[in-house]
Amino acid sequence: MRNNRVWGTVSAALLALSVAGCSSAPADQSDTNDVRNGESKQAVELKFWDMVWGPPEYIQAAQKLVEKFNQEHPGIKVSYQSTPWDNWYQTFTTAIASGTAPDVSTGAGYQAFQFYQMDAILPIDDVVEDMKKTGKLDDFYEGTVETLKYDNHYVSLPWALDIRVPFYNKETFEQAGVAVPKTWDELRAAAKTLSGNGKYGMVMPSDTGGTQYLYALMLNNGGGMFTKEKKVDLMNERNLEAITLIGDLVKDGSINPAGAGFKGDDAIKSFGQGDAAILIRNPGFKDALPELKDNIGIIPPIKGPHGDTGTIRWVNNMMIYKQSKHPEEAKQFMKWWSENNKPLWTEGHSNQLPARKSVAQDDYFQKDEHVKFILDQYVPIGQSTGSQYPSAFPELNEIEGEGLMQTLTQELIMGKDPVEAMKKAEAKMKEIMKEK
C-alpha cells in the first residue's frame, strides 16, 4: 500500500535467462532477437504506469531503468508513464473501461485485488512458480508473496514495503530520566511520566495515520481484525486489550486530546515542537524533521502482555492487466524490473522499503542506522491489515479508507468507551464484508 488506502507495490528470475540462454517461456526464447529468418521483427510495445514512489529523482531513476531494459531487449519497447496519486483510482478505472489500460503497473497495496475483482488483472501463478523453481522466491521477505494471493491465484508481485514503527524523542526521554519501554506496562508508565504542562507522552491524529496506531497495537498483541477464515473478528480479546491500552493512555492524560482534530502533518508538527515524545510513523519519518534527525530514536519492538511482537505492514506491488496483447513480454519485464530495481532507492530515493532481502543488503540501507534497524527488527514481524487471514483482499481498501476506523480512532482520543466504539466499528466492517 502506498500507505494503506491505496496508499500507501516486483520479483525476478528471467534476467538470468537472457544471460544463460535457457528458457521455457515462449516470449523468453526470443527476448533479444529482432531478426528472425532474415526478416525484421517489429518490437513489441508495452505501456508501464508507475506510481510516484518518491521525490523527483525517483521518476528519473525509473525512466533510466526502463531505458536499460529496452537496450537489453531490442524485441520489446517499454514506454514509461509516471502516474500521480491524485485521482489514481479514476485514472485506472477509466483506462480499464475504455480499453486503454497499461500492460503493467505498480500500485498500492490493494489495487491488484480491486481490479482483479473487475476481471482486469492477469494472474501471475506461472511467474511465481518459475521463481520458486529457480530459488528467487526466497529472496522476498517472508509473507510478502503470499499476501498477494487471492481467489487461489497470485494477482501481483511485491516490489516494496510500507511499515509503521514507534519513534521517540531521545532528548525528552533523557531529560525526564525515562527508559525506552520494552513492554506495554512500561510504555504506559513512560507516556504518563512524559505528560504534563502542555506536553504529552504521545500524539495520535484521527486520520488514517491515527488508525495505524490501532493496527500496530492489535498486531503487537497477536490480534487481528479477521479470523483465519476471513470472518470479522474485531472484538476478540487481544484486540480489546490493545484498544483498552489506548483508552488507558487517554485517561492518564498521556495522549494529546487535540489529536481528535489532527491530521498526520499536525502530529508531526507536534512531535517536532517537543509537545509529544512518541509518534508512530513510516520509516522515512526522520526526513520530515531534518533539524531533529539526530535526536529521533526508534523504540525496539515492544512485547505485548502475552509476549507477542508485531506491527502493521503493507506490500506494494506490480501487476499485469488482462487487456495486454503481450502478456508473456509483460511477465518478462515484470521479472526483470524486480531483479534490477535497486536504483529506485540508491538513485531515486524511494520512500518505501525493498521487498527483496538482497536489495536491502546494499550499503544504501545498511549504513542508514534507522533503516537498517527497521529492516532487521520490524519488517520480519510486519503483518497485513487482514490478519489473521493470510492474504490481503479487496474489502480492506474500504475498511481502511472509508472512515470507520478513523471514527473509532477519534472516539478513543475523545475518551469515549473503547468497547462501545469498537462495537460500532465492527458492525460497519460486517456490512462491508456482507456478514450477517
Image (cartoon, rainbow, N blue to C red):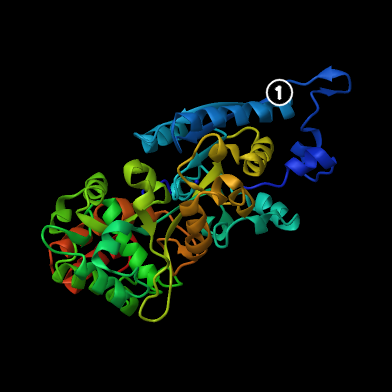
Residue 298 position, x and y percent, is 39, 59
Q: Residue sitting at 35 percent across and 42 percent down?
A: 290
Q: Quadrant of the C terminus?
A: bottom left
415 or 111, which lies in front?
415
Q: Which residue is mark 1?
A: 43
Q: Position of residue 296 (x, y in %)?
A: 35, 53
Q: Report the front residue among 103 and 371.
A: 371
Camera sees residue 39 = yes
Instruction: Say whether residue 77 is visible.
Output: no
Front residue of 256/241: it is 256
Which amino acid, mark 1? Answer: Ala
Residue drawn 43% across the image and 35% down it: 92
Q: Position of residue 225 (x, y in %)?
A: 36, 68
Residue at the bottom extreme?
Answer: 306
* Rendered view: 17 above or below 141: above
Q: Residues within 10 Å of mark 1 (few under 14, many from 20)?
A: some
Residue most extreme to the right: 37
Query: 351 left or right of 175?
Result: right
What is the residue that sits farthest to the left in this orientation? 197
Mark 1 residue element: loop
Residue 93 appears left or right of 22: left
Residue plotted at (41% across, 36% down): 93
Q: Nearer the viewer, residue 326 or 84?
A: 84
Give the image quarter of residue 44.
top right
In the image: residue 211, left or right of residue 228: left
In this rendering, the answer to whether 419 lies above or below 202 is: below
